[in-house]
């Protein structure tokens, strides 16, 4: 069994939605102190390199070990498991050397983040591993601020729905919640627009891409987005009442 006192600590660090100024003071401190920066690396999206660019512009990474973890974006369970097992083994290897590791993720590490999948796998290898999550600003909070759209007031309810799977789940959320945040909309945009038309909510929706970045885009007429590649960093907020 590993000596707990000599084992490094694993941090899941949310670096926010894109604007380096939206990183928390705690995130900056942890990233400055950690000798190892771990970043997920996939072949089909650029989210991972964006997280690295955010911290490079804030603290620099000179003298740090950059541990790129191959984590494919796929629904193939066997491929996912193999990638996560390998990444967990690499993280555990660094921790066993007594090195603290900061695993960076866009947004928050406990919301649709690879970090949450890796923690139990690391603990299988190092049962007494010290782990801490450092909260980050989420993309939808940044999007709501950019659009000056309150996500909830008073007793209003909020639902978060990923759109990469079943749009019928989105339909149910639209019927039961006052505000619905639609994530992962890039490959389902036309279907979402059609669904919003069917539910008479198209005029209650706002599309935001790359919230908090210099090239952020806000669109309130979603019909103009039909047939478009929305990009990975896009979402839609639907709020009953007027926008």
Image: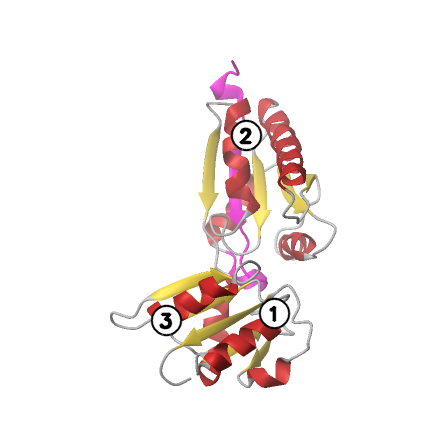
Is 212 above or below relative to 132? below
Can you give x and y, in whole percent of width and height, for residue 176 in the image? 34, 68
Range of the magenta residues?
1-23
Label 2: how many Cα within 10 Å (few below 14, some 14–19, many 20+):
many
Label 3: how many Cα within 10 Å (few below 14, some 14–19, many 20+):
few
Can you give x and y, in whole percent of width and height, for residue 126 in the image? 52, 23
Residue to which mark 3 is pinned:
175
**Mark 2 vs mark 1, CA separation in Å:** 33 Å
Evaluate if marks 2 and 1 touch, with contact meaning CB atoms under 8 Å apart. Answer: no
Can you give x and y, in whole percent of width and height, for residue 208 in the image? 55, 74
Q: Nearer the viewer, mark 2 or mark 1?
A: 2
Evaluate if marks 2 and 3 touch, with contact meaning CB atoms under 8 Å apart. Answer: no
Can you give x and y, in whole percent of width and height, for residue 59 in the image? 62, 51
| Circle number at residue 122 | 2
Evaluate if marks 1 and 3 touch, with contact meaning CB atoms under 8 Å apart. Answer: no
Identify the secondary structure beneath mark 3: helix
Residue 215 occupies quadrant: bottom right
User: Which is nearer the N-term, disc 1 or disc 3?
Assistant: 3
**Mark 2 vs mark 3, CA separation in Å:** 40 Å
Identify the secondary structure beneath mark 1: loop
User: Which is nearer the N-term, disc 2 or disc 3?
Assistant: 2
Residue to which mark 1 is pinned:
213
Label 1: how many Cα within 10 Å (few below 14, some 14–19, many 20+):
few
Q: Residue furthest right?
A: 43
Q: Residue furthest top?
A: 1
């Amino acid at each position: 069994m590993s000596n707990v006192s000599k084992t490094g600590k694993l941090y899941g660090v949310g670096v926010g939605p894109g604007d380096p100024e939206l990183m928390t003071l705690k995130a900056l401190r942890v990233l400055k102190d950690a000798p190892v920066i771990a970043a997920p690396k996939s072949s089909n999206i650029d989210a991972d390199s964006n997280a690295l660019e955010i911290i490079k512009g804030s603290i620099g990474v000179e003298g740090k070990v950059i541990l790129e973890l191959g984590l494919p974006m796929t629904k193939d369970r066997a491929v996912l498991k193999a990638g996560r097992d390998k990444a967990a083994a690499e993280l555990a290897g660094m921790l066993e050397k007594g090195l603290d590791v900061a695993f960076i993720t866009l947004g928050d590490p406990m919301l649709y983040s690879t970090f949450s999948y890796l923690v139990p796998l690391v603990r299988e290898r190092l049962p007494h591993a010290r782990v801490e999550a450092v909260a980050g600003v989420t993309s939808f909070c940044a999007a709501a601020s950019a659009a000056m759209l309150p996500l909830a007031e008073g007793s209003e309810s909020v639902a978060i729905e990923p759109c990469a799977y079943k749009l019928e789940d989105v339909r149910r959320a639209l019927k039961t919640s006052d505000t619905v945040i639609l994530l992962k909309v890039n490959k389902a945009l036309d279907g979402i627009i059609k669904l919003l038309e069917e539910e008479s909510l198209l005029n209650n929706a706002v599309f935001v891409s790359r919230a908090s970045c210099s090239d952020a885009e806000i669109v309130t007429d979603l019909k103009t987005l039909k047939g478009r590649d929305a990009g990975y960093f896009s979402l839609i907020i639907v709020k009953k009442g007027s926008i």
